[in-house]
Amino acid sequence: MASNNSSVGKEIVSYCGKCKKATDHIITSMVTSIRIGKCQCTKCKAVHNYKDPEDALNPKPRKAWKPSEKKSDLSPTIQWQQAIASATGEPRPYAMDAHFAAGDVIDHATFGRGIVENDLGGSKIQVLFETGERTLVHDKCIPVAAPVTE
């Protein structure tokens, strides 16, 4: 970066994106007392953020892109079929106020039959349905409305 005696109005060498090379610039703003903010090229008069010429002319090699790791290459339907086939126990109807644990088989009114994969903490569970994974609420205390008295 720049030397410690940099200040607004002083001349410095910076990489100019418009000129495509390192040229003389005038400092127009400072971010901190030692860090240059913006500068103006003395050749083309463009104002831009300070760019260290060594960093701009010798860029660091980029890391090769790699796809994110998937849980499985199997489709959700195949994962669901395998999970249901290995599940033990009878399916229970899903209700927000019921407690479920990993491995429980549930029947959901909208999503159908599913298997609880894990407890996400708090009152959430991760359930694998034929259409894919869903996060559902469980163990939720649902307040009962008091009867109306006249």
Image (cartoon, helix red, strand yellow):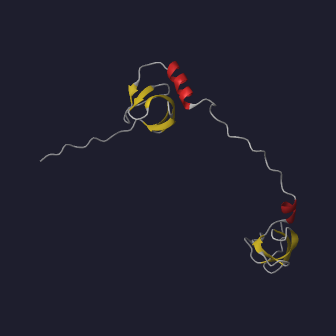
Q: Quadrant where the N terminus lies?
A: bottom right
| Residue at x 41%, y 20% (from the top left corner) | 90
Residue 127 percent across, percent down from the top left: 49, 32
- For the view shown, which residue lies furthest in the left direction? 150
Q: Nearer the viewer, residue 150 or 117?
A: 117
Residue 120 percent across, percent down from the top left: 51, 37
Examine the rendered structure and indicate whether residue 144 appears above or below residue 22.
Answer: above
Q: Nearer the viewer, residue 21 or 143?
A: 21
Examine the rendered structure and indicate whether residue 18 appears above or below residue 57.
Answer: below
| Residue at x 41%, y 23% (from the top left corner) | 91
| Residue at x 22%, y 43% (from the top left corner) | 146
Residue 140 percent across, percent down from the top left: 38, 38
Q: Residue 98: name its quadrant.
A: top left
Residue 138 horizontal side relative to residue 39, left or right: left
Q: Nearer the viewer, residue 89 or 68?
A: 68
Q: Residue 113: name its quadrant.
A: top left
Residue 136 percent across, percent down from the top left: 45, 37
Residue 119 horizontal side relative to residue 62, left or right: left
Tell how many labels.
0
Residue 121 horizontal side relative to residue 56, left or right: left
Examine the rendered structure and indicate whether residue 98 appears above or below residue 67.
Answer: above
| Residue at x 82%, y 74% (from the top left corner) | 6
